[in-house]
Image (tube, rainbow, N blue to C red):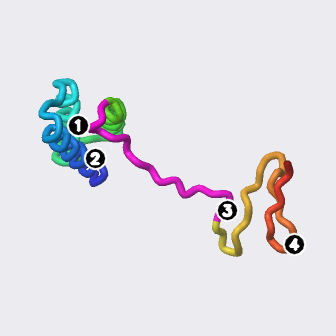
Amino acid sequence: MDEMTNISYDAVVRYFTSLAQFGYRSYGDVNKLLALLVLDDVLNVFSEYIDEKDLRSIVNAIYCLSGTTCLIDFPSYVNDDTLFHKTKINYITRITEDNILRVDETNVIRIEA
């Protein structure tokens, strides 16, 4: 829920910054911002009453609002997936279906072209 609060805070900061620079924001942008703030309040205040289906609907509504205006950014995701995965023994390469990635005796990856 903290990520949702950060997204809402950033959107409000962008709103007041653009309002200070341009003096006007369209009613559609303001309505989308208000909808985002209402969804944030619903998630924070009524979190104990929201089940999985309701949460999925709220998240889908937030995705529909994200990126439709410059005030609301898309949520950021960190993808740490690489070709190497840590195991208990060593780092090994991911096994592919057609064995494209191979490792020699000195643990240097050999890639077939």
Callout 2 secondary element:
helix
**Relative to the observer, which residue lies in front, 95 or 17?**
17
Q: Earlier in the sequence, mark 1 or mark 2?
A: 2
Magenta span has 81? yes
Give the residues in magenta: 69-85
Q: CA distance from mark 3 to mark 1?
A: 38 Å
Residue furthest to the front: 21
Task: Tell whether 74 sits left or right of 81.
Answer: left
Horizontal relation, residue 86 to residue 41: left or right: right
Q: List the residue tagged with mark 1.
A: 36
Label 4 to label 2: alpha-carbon separation: 49 Å
CB under 8 Å between discs 1 and 2: yes
67 in the magenta segment: no
Q: Are marks 3 and 2 in contact (CB under 8 Å)?
A: no
Specify the label residue 84 is tagged with: 3
SS of the residue under disc 1: helix
Residue 113 in percent (x, y) is at 85, 48
Q: Which amino acid type is marked by label 2?
A: Ile
Query: How far across and how far down the image is residue 58, in percent?
Result: 30, 35
Could you tell me which secondary element the residue under label 4 belongs to? Answer: loop
Real-space Cα separation, disc 1 to disc 4, in angstroms: 55 Å
Residue corresponding to mark 2: 7
Q: How far apart are the two marked residues, 3 and 2, measured between alpha carbons?
A: 32 Å
Q: Quadrant of residue 106?
A: bottom right
What's the residue at 80%, 71% (across, down)?
A: 107
* SS at circle 3: strand
Q: Label 3 is placed on what type of residue?
A: Phe
Q: CA distance from mark 1 to mark 2?
A: 9 Å
Label at residue 100: none
Q: Is residue 49 visible?
A: no
Q: What residue is shown with label 4?
A: 105
